[in-house]
Image: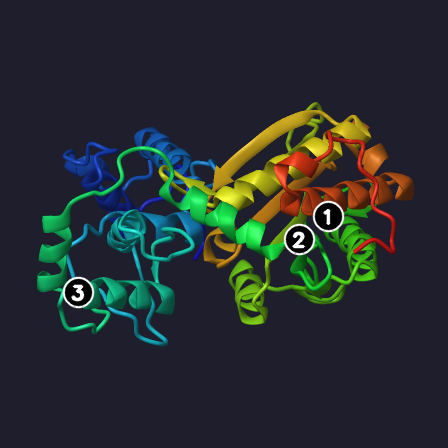
Amino acid sequence: MQPLRRGATGSAVAEVRSMLAAIGLLDNTRAESAAVFDDATELAVRHFQQRRGLSVNGEVGAETYAALTAAHWRLGDRVLAHESGATLTGDDVTSLQTQLIELGYHLTRADGVFEAATAEALRSFQREYGMVPDGICGPDTLRALRQLGRRVAGGRPQLLRDMVTVADAGPRLLGKRIVLDAGHGGTDPGVEADGLSEAEITWDLVSRLDGRLTALGVRTWPTHGPANGATDEQRAQLANAVGADLVLSLHVDGAPSPRAHGVATYYYGAGESSSTIGERLADLALREIVARTGMSDNRIHGKTWALLRLTRMPAVRVELGYLTSPRDRSLLRDPAFRDTVAEGLLVAVQRLYLPSADDPPTGVMRIPAEAH
């Protein structure tokens, strides 16, 4: 869809305003502004994007529109079931998943997508509660969930299970499965400045990291080749299809001001729902890169971008500086800098799997190619 922004008018704007009003972010009572994307609409959109972990630009593109559509569903509004080719998404699914996680059923996270894993967790609940285990959340199942209420108050009930999963995987990198995603590609160069493109830089970085990981016995998959691109949904589908342990997505940023600079990392996170292992890896990756390169630390952030949300394993996106910054651009142009970043990311992955007693200080670990 064409993004809707300030000044737009028409039925699509009216729909957006209606959805914003339904979730309490906009006063839509004045008939003269019901189909106008005015300042109040932009402010409401920015508020919604901030709250949902989306890119905050005040525009309604495909991702923001999908999130708005999902936001109006409440648990009990409709029957929830898993059907191939017609996957249900919405805040009602998130509420169901959150309750199942709190009750101890195995789900990676509450991502608002009713897939096979959610149906299986629901069947387990129904079986243990003496109901027909059909994996469908209808009135009877909903009534049973409400009778049980919440079992966990506060904290992060998924954290312990995630920690056990990582511990069970062991500290060795040999046999790990990692998807490497070079941002953009094909006809989409990403950010461009002074003869450099984001797609060119990220592909080079992925190639350097791929060589290091492969030498250590890690099985790697690039999401696409240097001459073609893919949507974030397609990249997530690849990661899920190969059963990856981790996804590393590399990007370079850009900004209107040349003063914007530094590195930031992102993981799946919005409200109470987040990827705890993704958050840990995002933190490790940021600290290793900052310690080894001296780049400015722009922190880690929880987001609900498609690649982070739709992958069933921890996924981290690294925004490695700003091509629009003369300072960062000079670093990104240097092959030695790219080697340093690849080494830092490799160390971050290794540290993720190390027991806390064996985890070295940031910036000091070196991994010889023959070490598995």
User: Is tag 1's residue or tag 2's residue first in the polypeptide sequence?
Assistant: 2
Which of marks 3 and 2 precedes in the sequence? 3
- Residue 325 in the image, given as x and y percentages of width and height: 75, 30
Say which residue appears at 66% left-offset and 59% top-offset: 178
x 30%, y 67%: residue: 119
Residue 114 seen in render: yes
Query: At x 26% / y 35%, what residue is drawn?
Result: 153
Tell me the CA gap for discs 2 and 3.
Answer: 37 Å
Q: Amino acid at mark 2?
A: Gly
Q: Is residue 10 at least partly visible in the picture? A: no
- The residue sitting at the front extreme is 357
Three-letter code for the amino acid on which mark 1 is drawn: Glu
Provide the residue designation for mark 2: 183
**Which one is in front, 120 or 258?**
120
Residue 198 tag number: 1
Residue closer to the observer: 97 or 224 = 97
Task: Give the CA distance from mark 1 to mark 3.
Answer: 44 Å
In this rendering, position of residue 296 left or right of residue 271: right
Which of the two marks, 1 or 3, is nearer to us in this view?
A: 3
Q: Are marks 1 and 2 in contact (CB under 8 Å)?
A: yes
Q: Is 188 above or below relative to 36? A: below
- Label 1: element kind: helix
**Tag on residue 79?**
3
